[in-house]
Amino acid sequence: MKCLLDGQVTTDTYDTCQGYILLEPSDIPQTNLVFDKALYLEVSGYLLLSFVVGHGAGRVVRWMSKL
């Protein structure tokens, strides 16, 4: 972790830094992120379905307002 204060980068600690804290990749804990393809497909399918239904409903409402 580094500290940025008045354009100068220092190696102050979190408690003593008076400016912005700059994190390095080693400061962030590395976790094994697992991408769930089935969940992604389900969510994107529901989003697509809601878009199509919402678009269709909007067209119907617009058509009915012209009557």
Image: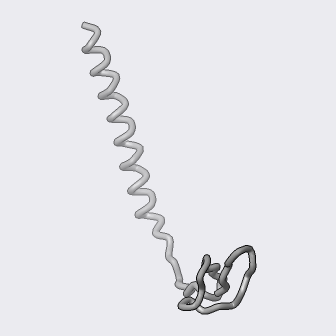
Whole-percent x and y of residue 20? 61, 76
Q: Quadrant of residue 40?
A: bottom left
**Residue in the picture at 66% in, 83% down:** 3
- Outermost residue toward the top? 67
Q: Quadrant of residue 53?
A: top left
Quarter containing the C terminus: top left
Q: Quadrant of residue 54?
A: top left
Whole-percent x and y of residue 19? 61, 78
Whole-percent x and y of residue 1? 64, 87
Residue toward you, 18 or 12: 18
Residue toward you, 13 or 41: 13
All told, the count of numbered labels is 0
The answer to whether 29 is drawn above or below residue 60 in the figure is below
Q: Going by the image, does 45 lie left or right of 61?
A: right
Q: Colour scheme of this structure image?
A: one colour
**Residue in the picture at 32% in, 26% down:** 58
Q: Going by the image, does 45 lie left or right of 65?
A: right
**Residue in the picture at 34% in, 42% down:** 50
- Outermost residue toward the right? 8
Q: Going by the image, does 33 lie left or right of 65?
A: right
